[in-house]
Amino acid sequence: MKRGHADLPLHYGTVPSWLAQRMSLLGGAITEAIISEYGHQAFLQRLSDPFWFQSLGCVLGMDWHSSGITTSVMNALKKAINKRSNELGIYICGGRGKASRQTPSELLAIAEKTGLNGDELVRNSRLSAKVDNTAVQDGFQLYLHSFIVTKNGDWAVIQQGMNPDERMARRYHWLSSSLQSFTEEPHTSVCGKNQGLILNLTDKLAAPTKKGIIDLTKESPDKIMREVSIILPKHHEVNADDVNMKRLGAALLLAHETNVSDVESLLLLEGTGPRTIQSLTLVSEVIHGTPSRFSDPARFSFAHGGKDGHPFPVPTRVYDETIEIFDKAIHQSKLGNKEQSEALKNLSRISQEIEKNFTPNNFFDDLIRHERNHSFEYGGKTVYGDAKRPEKSYRQLDLWD
């Protein structure tokens, strides 16, 4: 079972409306593509993988390592999915704060429409929250609870706790298909800063302690939570060390140095600019990539930047073109024409083929400088305003000339 810890610094503030709307549109398209291609269970499994979830947040334009990814991504998915739940066969309940307390009533309403066992779903929701708030006493108080359920009754839970004193958050992932017991190692992953010795009654090694508690003894658990090996750093900016340069370089090479019209399987994307191909390649990998491909979530921020300008402003025109292309591909696929959706799928495959023989050089700083210099051309935006034309002639600094 995957275990681990990842620093998730608390970020306050709201997502600007221009980004929230795009996140919902692209998040909905990605969800529909995954369900159509791989099924409902595959989508739940992806949600239960903290690295995939973080990668999804990055490709949607959120800051790559902050706690805000959780709230913003789940809000975007809930808005996109729930208005089409009957069609997609998946429902998202709960959310942050007051919304989390609506989960039981939302689940009962879904059960009434679908015939699922509402009482059991409510029990699962409440138990998962109780476990992470009470059985695991790690200094984090839950403030977000999202319960995702399919028409078949399979479910996943994503919830997050806050430690305001440490200005850190911890995210908890659950998946019903891998759950053996609510009280013994129920999580697929726990993401958060290692707090050292904690009270964790879900640890398999805490069985004697649980028995002692039931017997009203005062025996304390003496084992700590075992967590994952990957730590997301505290720094806000994206550094070269945060990214697998071989993977990123292959995607860039495909986008900027390959003539798309020379690649037979990508003919339907001809006319799409290199910058959009760059974004489409990274979004394609979020949909079709295997779990091992998401060990460096920061790489996916090179699809659509970040709202705070790290690694660069969000290129809204590229973002809109990405949404349009995926929406069109999904629509055509429903009509039986899968050529464009297959072309988009092949982007991630071809990028991986290029990666095998790609040797990265020191292009990271040049890449970020290039993106920032050209950001104004792509409708670049951050929470601070629109991207401006650089004072120095940006043509002299062009990475691809």
Image (cartoon, rainbow, N blue to C red):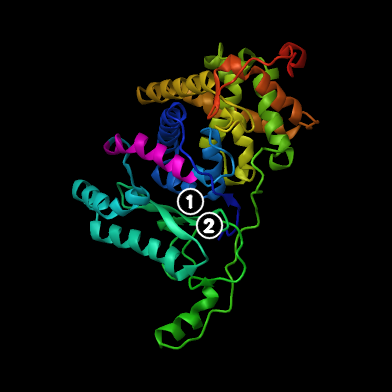
**Above/below status of 239 relative to 397:** below
Quarter of the N terminus within the rendering = bottom right
User: What is the x, y in percent for residue 235?
Assistant: 67, 44
Check whether the beta carbons of the residues at disc 2 and disc 1 lie within 8 A of each other: yes
Instruction: Determine crowd level at label 1: few under 14, some 14-19, many 20+ residues with C-alpha closer than 10 A.
Output: many
Q: Residue at x 77, y 28 (%)?
A: 363
Residue located beneath label 2 in the image: 189
Residue 249 vs 53, above or below: the answer is above
Helix, strand or loop under label 2? strand
Residue at 75% x, 29% y is 365
Task: Specify whether residue 324 is painted magenta.
Answer: no
Task: Locate residue 91 relative to residue 344 in the image: left or right.
Answer: left
In the foreground, 282 or 394: 394
Q: Quadrant of residue 239?
A: top right
Q: Position of residue 52 (x, y in %)?
A: 54, 44
Q: Main secondary structure of the magenta part?
A: helix
Q: Position of residue 279 (x, y in %)?
A: 57, 26
Residue 181 shows in this picture:
no
Query: Can residue 376 be seen in the rendering of this structure?
Result: yes
- Labels 2 and 1: the sequence-earlier one: 1
**Residue labelled with disc 1:** 48
Looking at the image, which residue sits at the far left?
112
* Total labels drawn: 2
Q: Is residue 82 covered in magenta?
A: yes
Residue type highlighted by circle 2:
Ser
Chain part drawn in magenta: 70-86
Q: Amino acid at mark 1?
A: Ser
Residue at x 54% of width, y 20% of height: 318
Comparing 299 with 134, the one in front is 134
Residue 235 vertical position relative to residue 251 in the rendered view, above or below: below
Q: Position of residue 179 (x, y in %)?
A: 43, 62
The C terminus lies in quadrant: top right
